[in-house]
Amino acid sequence: MAKIKGKNLSASAHILYDPQTCTGCGLCELMCSLYHEGEQGQALSRAELVGDRLTAEFIFNVCQQCPSPSCYNACLLKDKALCIDEVTGVKYINAEECDGCGKCIEACPYNPPRINLHPEKNAALMCDLCRGRVEGPICVEYCSFDSLTYAGKEER
């Protein structure tokens, strides 16, 4: 179990991506934005599908729910804006508290960062594995080609 500034944390689940089966349909982004924001839009999705539709080569960028998250440590409003569920270990953003400073984006070790700013609200967006959704992540459920897999924390 990892420790972050006095907090005991367990690893969380995460989403695995298989580029060999992905067709780039974008249903993952569509369902994510609809579920979280109530409207469709790539910029509103907490995941990003990028690629070349001519070569059918795609990459699915999503928060990997790092066991020792640098985004969390960088957040000036940790435990208010960028939070960690102490039961599941899932990292998530409380948009009501987030001031959109971007420190979490700068600290993300991935390139491109797996956290983005909402285009209209002054808050960050990151995958929270559809925290609280009984069926799990909506992108995994609606992926028609089984390119996305929900991997439990024991699979880290």
Image (tube, rainbow, N blue to C red):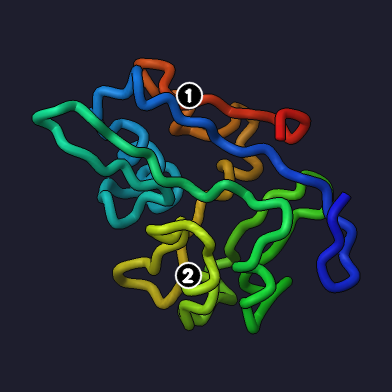
In the depicted structure, whether residue 2 falls above or below residue 96? above
Q: Nearer the viewer, residue 92 or 134?
A: 92
Residue at 26%, 50% in the rendered image: 41
In the depicted structure, whether residue 2 falls above or below residue 106? above
How far apart in space, not on screen, are marks 2 and 1 (Cα)?
27 Å
Q: Quadrant of residue 145?
A: top left
Q: Position of residue 155 (x, y in %)?
A: 72, 29
Residue situated furthest left in the rendering = 54
Q: Left or right: 44 with respect to 83?
A: left
What secondary structure is marked by label 1? Answer: helix
Q: Position of residue 146 (x, y in %)?
A: 43, 17
In the depicted structure, whether residue 94 falls above or below residue 126? below
Residue at 89%, 58% in the rendered image: 8
Front of the two marks 2 and 1: 2
> Considering the image in quadrants, where does the C terminus appear?
top right
What's the amino acid at mark 2?
Ile
Q: Nearer the viewer, residue 65 or 130?
A: 65
Q: Position of residue 147 (x, y in %)?
A: 41, 22
What's the amino acid at mark 1?
Glu
What secondary structure is marked by label 2? Answer: helix
Residue at 30%, 49% in the rendered image: 39
Q: Quadrant of residue 83?
A: bottom right
Crowdedness near tag 1: few (<14), some (14–19) or many (≥20) residues, C-alpha within 10 Å? some
Q: Nearer the viewer, residue 91 or 41?
A: 91
Crowdedness near tag 2: few (<14), some (14–19) or many (≥20) residues, C-alpha within 10 Å? many
Q: Left or right: 24 with respect to 90?
A: left
Task: Identify residue for label 2.
Answer: 105
Task: Identify residue for label 1.
Answer: 141
Of label 2 and label 1, which has the lower sequence position? 2
Q: How many marks?
A: 2
